[in-house]
Amino acid sequence: MISAVIVAAGGSQRMGFDKLGVEVEGMPLLGHSIAAFQNCETVGEIVLVTAESRFAEIEALAAARAWTKLRPLVPGGVQRHDSVRAGLAATNPDFPVIAVHDGARPLVTPELIQRCAKAALTHGAASAAAPVIETLKRRDPATGHTAEAVDRTELWGMQTPQAFRREILIAAYEGLHGRLVTDEASAVEIMGKPVMLIDHPEWNVKVTYPKDLPLVALVLSGRLKSKTE
């Protein structure tokens, strides 16, 4: 079984407003992330780390949607890694795999969660990711002009979920000793453990700017339509 830690304690600073509470296709944005883990048969529990001001809203939504896997909510920390650490502490120690997911990635699917978890069991660590397809240039900070081209051949953009055998992720966080990391894969890499990259053909964007919302709504609408046809 999988322990899922969903991190949703950010302040939406680049968005300019509370993106997690925006209603998309009949449910708050954050709810779509929770629902994907609820509907994944190998997920045994969902630990949601979020702002205490959101607790009442989430608890009401969980009751209405019968999200039986959602555990008592956990208050978020100052930094992302503080929130993840708090979430890890609340998981069931008997579950062998931990999957960490950004609450602002509402297009995650149960299938992707399963693929990452299966790869984690085999390789110890795995993450959803996508190959970089744009032409990359390094910018000269002094002039604002292009300085050089960057070879994108083996460059990948990291996503979530990121899944790990429990003992590996716990050891990685215990070994950080104050160092800041932007994702769990980085914490695991610091201890010398490689992370298997899992490509995924469907959209799995992180909602960061207002322009991301129409795309997410379109994809979710298309998925709902295909289920009813």
Image (cartoon, rainbow, N blue to C red):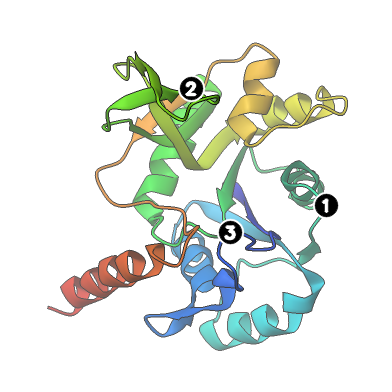
The quadrant in which the C terminus is found is: bottom left
Q: Position of residue 202 (x, y in %)?
A: 27, 50
- Residue 140: numbered disc: 2
With 57 as the anchor, is 131 left or right in this view?
Answer: left
Amino acid type of the residue tagged 2 in the rendering: Asp
Residue type pointed to by label 1: Val
Residue at the spot 57% in from the left edge and 77% down from the top edge = 21
Name the spot of residue 73 as percent of width and height, x first.
Answer: 76, 67
Of circles 2 and 3, which is in front? 2
Q: Position of residue 116 (x, y in %)?
A: 44, 38
Cα–Cα span, label 1 and label 3: 17 Å
Which one is in front in this view, the residue at disc 1 or the one at disc 3?
3
Q: Nearer the viewer, residue 14 or 168?
A: 14
* Sequence-earlier tag: 1 or 3: 3
Q: Tell me which numbered mark, 2 or 1, is placed earlier along the sequence.
A: 1
The mark that comes first in sequence, 2 or 3, is 3
Q: Nearer the viewer, residue 63 or 18?
A: 18
Rendering quarter of residue 18: bottom right
Spot occupied by residue 134 in the image (x, y as percentages of width and height): 27, 33
Label 1, on which residue? Answer: 78
Residue in view at x 40 percent, y 26 percent: 145
Q: Residues within 10 Å of mark 3 (few under 14, many from 20)?
A: few
Q: Does residue 155 lie above or below 95 as drawn? A: above
Count residues near mark 2 (Cα–Cα under 10 Å), then give few for <14, some for 14-19, many for 20+.
few
Instruction: Give the residue at x 47% y 59%.
Output: 207
> Is 181 left, or right, of 64 in this rendering?
right
Q: Secondary structure at mark 2?
A: loop
Name the residue tied to disc 3: 14
**How many numbered marks does the figure carry?**
3
